[in-house]
Amino acid sequence: MSELKNDRYLRALLKQPVDKTPVWMMRQAGRYLPEYKATRAEAGDFMSLCKNHDLACEVTLQPLRRYDLDAAILFSDILTIPDAMGCGLYFETGEGPRFERPTDTIEKIEKLAVPDPEDELGYVMKAVSTIRRELKGEVPLIGFSGSPWTLATYMVEGGSSKTFEKIKRMMYAEPQALHMLLDKLADSVTSYLNAQVKNGAQSLMIFDSWGGALSHSAYREFSLRYMQKIVDGLIRENEGRKVPVTLFTKGGGLWLEAMAETGCDALGLDWTIDIKDARARVGDKVALQGNMDPSMLYAPIPRIEEEVQQILAGYGEGTGHVFNLGHGIHQHVDPEHAGAFIEAVHKYSAQYHK
Ligand SMILES: Cc1c2[nH]c(c1CCC(=O)O)Cc1[nH]c(c(CCC(=O)O)c1C)Cc1[nH]c(c(CCC(=O)O)c1C)Cc1[nH]c(c(C)c1CCC(=O)O)C2
C-alpha cells in the first residue's frame, strides 16, 4: 500500500498537529454534482450504482477531482445492512428508501441473521478495495455504517418516517423485541465495519441520523448503548496506523459528554450547537467534526466565507477539528459554492495551527 500523501484528516481526528484544518463534506458524492447525475443515470437506480464497484469508485472520486478535499468517503448507503438481512430495500423516486419486508414483529426479528460482510455485502468490500487502490494514497478513505437505532427505524417503519410511530410503540410496549433487533444490528455493524477496515478503510464513521428523536434516557438505552457495543468491538489499528472512529448523532448536542465516554476518537456535530461550547464540554477527550449548516451553501460566497471564519474562530487554536457540514450537502447547492467553502477552510485555518 502506498504512503498517504495527505493525512491531515487522520491527524486531526487523533489530535496530532496539522498545518491546516482538514475538510470534507457529508454526502460529498451526490446529486448536486452533474457528473454524479450522469454516472447515476448510466447505472440505472441508486442501488445498482452502489453494487457496481467501478461506478461506486468513480462517484467517490468525482468530488476529489473538483475540490481540495482531505478525505474520501466510500460511496454506498447505510441501508445495505438491512438489505443484506433480507428486508428488500428499494428507492421510490422522491420518496426516499423503502423496505418490501419491514421487521415490525418479534417473530420477524427472531428470524433475522447477521449478514456475512464478505458474502452478502461483498459488493461493498469490493468497492472499498477498488476505491482504496484508485485513491493512490492521495487522501484517506472513510468507511461508514448507520447506527443500530437508525437502521432499526427504517427496518421497523418500512422506510423513512417523521413520527417514528411504529418503532416508538415497539420501544415502549415491547422493549425486549427492539433490544433483540438492536443487538443483532450492533453485531452486524461491527463485523461490517471491521471488514471495511480489512479491505482498506482508514477511518470509520457511524451515522446516528435519528438518535435525536429519542428522549434523554431512551437515547442511552436504545442508541448509545449499541454504539458503545460497536466501538468496543472495532479494529482500532491497521497497517501500522490508528483507525479513528467518529460518532455522529444528529440532534445529539445535549449528549456529547456521554458520547465521548464511549472511547470513540471524534464526535460529529450538527449545526444546532456552538462548536466553542462543544469543545469546552468534551475537553481533550475527543476531536470534533462539523458544523456549518448545509443550507449556508445557498448564501452568496462572501457570506459562506464569513461563516467558515466564525466556526474556525469558535473552535480556536490547535488541532482536533475536522471541518464539515452539520449534515449532508443539499442536492440544489451550486457546486461553485461548495468549492468556495472548502477553499475558505484551508485559507482561513492556517493561522490557528502555528
Ligand atoms: C439516513 C441515511 C441514509 N443514507 C445515509 C444516511 C446517514 C446520513 C444522513 O443522515 O443523511 C448515508 C449515506 N448515503 C450516501 C452516502 C455516500 C457517501 C457520501 O458521499 O457521503 C452516505 C454516507 C449516498 C446516498 N444515499 C442516497 C443518495 C441519493 C440517491 C440518488 O442518487 O438518487 C446518495 C447520494 C439515498 C438515501 N439513503 C438514505 C436516504 C434518506 C436517502 C435519500 C433518498 C432521497 O433523497 O431520494 C438513508
Image: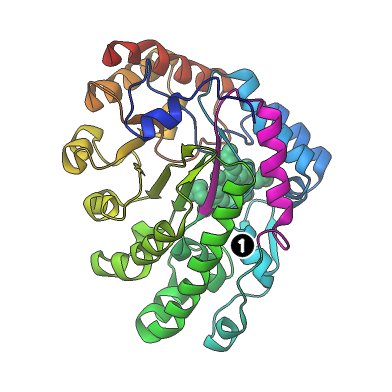
Is 295 in front, or is 25? 25
Position of residue 132 measured from the top left corner of the image (x, y, whole percent): 66, 35
For this orientation, the residue located farthest to the bottom is 107
| Quadrant of the rendering where the C terminus is positioned | top left
Position in image of residue 83 (x %, y %): 67, 64
Label 1 CA crowd tier, 10 Å (few <14, some 14–19, many 20+): many
On the picture, is 241 further left or further right than 318? right
Q: Mark 1 points at which residue?
A: 81
Judged left or right of residue 273, residue 140 is: right
> Residue visible at 22% across and 23% down?
316
In magenta stretch: residue 281:
no
User: Which region of the structure is painted magenta?
Assistant: 117-145
Q: Where is residue 46 in the image (x, y as percent from the top left)?
A: 72, 48
Residue that extends furthest to the front in the rendered view of this protein: 240
Q: As shown in the figure, which amino acid type bears the numbered disc 1?
A: Ile
Secondary structure of the residue carrying numbered label 1? helix
Q: Looking at the image, how many numbered discs can be counted on the residues?
A: 1
Say above or below: 258 vs 272.
below
Q: Indicate whether 37 appears above or below 2.
A: below
Q: Which residue is drawn at 47% across and 20% down?
A: 342
In percent of width and height, residue 56 lies at: 72, 40
Task: Give residue 331's quadrant in the image.
Answer: top right
Q: Does the magenta stretch include residue 121?
A: yes
Q: Say left or right for 314 vs 346.
A: left
At x 45%, y 60%, the residue is 233
Image quarter hosting the N terminus = top right
